[in-house]
Image (spheres, rainbow, N blue to C red):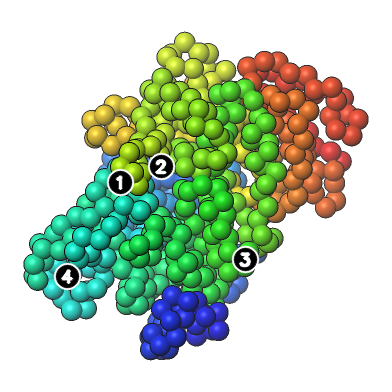
Amino acid sequence: MTPRQFEALQAIYGDTLARAWAPRFEALGERWRARMPAAADTPGALTARDVLLITYADQIREPDRPPLQSLHAFARAHLTGVVSGLHLLPFYPWSSDDGFAVKDYFAVDPAYGTWEDVERLGRDFALMFDAVCNHLSAQSDWFRRFLAGDPDYRDFFVTVEGNPDLSGVVRPRALPLLTEFATATGRRRVWTTFSADQVDLNYQNPAVLLRVTEALLFYAARGARFLRLDAVAFLWKEIGTPCLHHPRTHALIRFWRAVLEELAPAVRLITETNVPHADNVAYFGNGHDEAHLVYNFALPPLVLHALASGRAETLTAWARTLRPPSARCAFFNFLASHDGIGLNPVRGLLSEAEIDTLVARTRAHGGFVSHRHLPDGSEAPYELNINYLDALADPGAGEPVERVARRFLTAHALMLSLPGVPALYFHSLFGSRGDRAGAESSGLPRRINRQKLETARLEAELADSTSLRARVFQGLRELLHRRRENPAFDPVAPAEYSAPDPRVFVVHRRAPDSGGVWCFHNVSGDPVSLPGAPGGGPAVPLAPWDYRWIEVP
């Protein structure tokens, strides 16, 4: 065990437990060391060519073909040279939450395909796997053995005795925190942060950390190049604390980072922490010891606010603060995902009135709003459940396709211009609209942005150059091509922001051997002509909701 691993283990469990368990973690590492990809397969630093697509394993479907195989064929045909990797949302056996109630960390759901299908996909694209490390399905084998009184699993899940004050626990959803289950030793109340079907693991038991660490190593051996630590901010439960951002949660991440750097140095950790921005960036640690990448959760609502208000001042002021603590880490930039648009990350950046305006806009544009419990028993808007294109487009069907596409492309050009590694959601890259009927029929608001598509119909719509899908995909493909060919867009390349007009977001990305790229984005419905590009260049005309990237020799 390396000194960094042992130091993190001590921070989690104290010296006595750390010394008692260190040999078991050492043995685990030795078992998996030989199974890791060869050192020659280890990639170098992330560059402008690194772009990920966020997708479900069964995002596209064909008759009589495993969805992972359909996705692979579609990706090879349409995404080669467009994105470098795929974030496969949980493809393990599951019982609810569209995959995030995992029944078995070590299996592929047979409805999607096999591990061989996953590994074949990984030969053409870098893969991100989800490590759903906060909880397991109530139908998992681990939890069933807990319910049966198996001594090996007796302390695997967080249980609560008596009636302690839990009002200060931070909740992400307006659901009960505890769920009662019948066990072999009587009825017990189990901590369920996200739903009654998602039971929280007990990291105060080192055996849990051992088994989850084994899952991470298993994923690395199966070809994962990125590991997304889902809901990681909630990992450590301690009654009397908010159970969010606990110091031992950060120690757990440091431990996993140290383990992977020894055994699987090609793998990068990404923390999924949908929280206020200042808390979010804390998961970089010192820039070398926690996450390699942190989800930039404030970006989606800030970009939406900018385009909805026609003003870029708040976005520009915030972007100037984006300074990762070292060149070895970067933001993971996105506008849409399988989840909604989180509001917690912009509390303190936007006023409550501005947040209320986004909530009203979401409802007016056909979306839903999810809430969370506050310690005083009230509720607050937590997440906007809406397709991002619908959030930007005018409500109804009257807006011209060209204008819908232009506004959407400008939002993404802005995102792609920022330092960090970009990710695009499948439904964004291919210009989908929201599936309100699917959300209503399931009772799950997030399903408004999770519709599964038939391959033949998707191909036909992409072949129609006048369709919204074709316009969006072609525009994004061109943007991504320009981006990947210019080192000024490397994740850690310098960025400078200016504000020549409050309606325009301007960033200058610099490269070592050139003047870099000036990126102009008009977030308003007004035509804008800037008096001249910085450095004395010609005037820069921008149509409503338009962008221009100007390369400087």
Which quadrant of the structure image shows residue 530?
top right
Q: Name the residue under label 3.
A: 286
For discs 3 and 2, the disc positioned in front in the rendered view: 3
Q: Name the residue under label 1.
A: 98
Q: Circle 2: is it few (<14), some (14-19), or many (20+) Cα within 10 Å?
A: many
Sequence order check: which comes first, mark 2 or mark 1? 1
Query: Residue 278: percent from the left, percent from the top?
Result: 56, 51
Q: Which amino acid does label 2 sit on?
A: His
For discs 4 and 2, the disc positioned in front in the rendered view: 4
Label 3 to label 1: alpha-carbon separation: 34 Å
> What residue lies at 55% left-to-right and 48% top-to-bottom?
277
Label 4 to label 2: alpha-carbon separation: 31 Å
Query: Residue 195: percent from the left, percent from the top?
Result: 26, 50
Q: In this view, does 227 lie above or below 352?
A: below
> In the displayed structure, does residue 538 sit left or right of residue 528?
right
Which secondary structure, mark 2? loop
Q: Name the residue under label 4.
A: 145
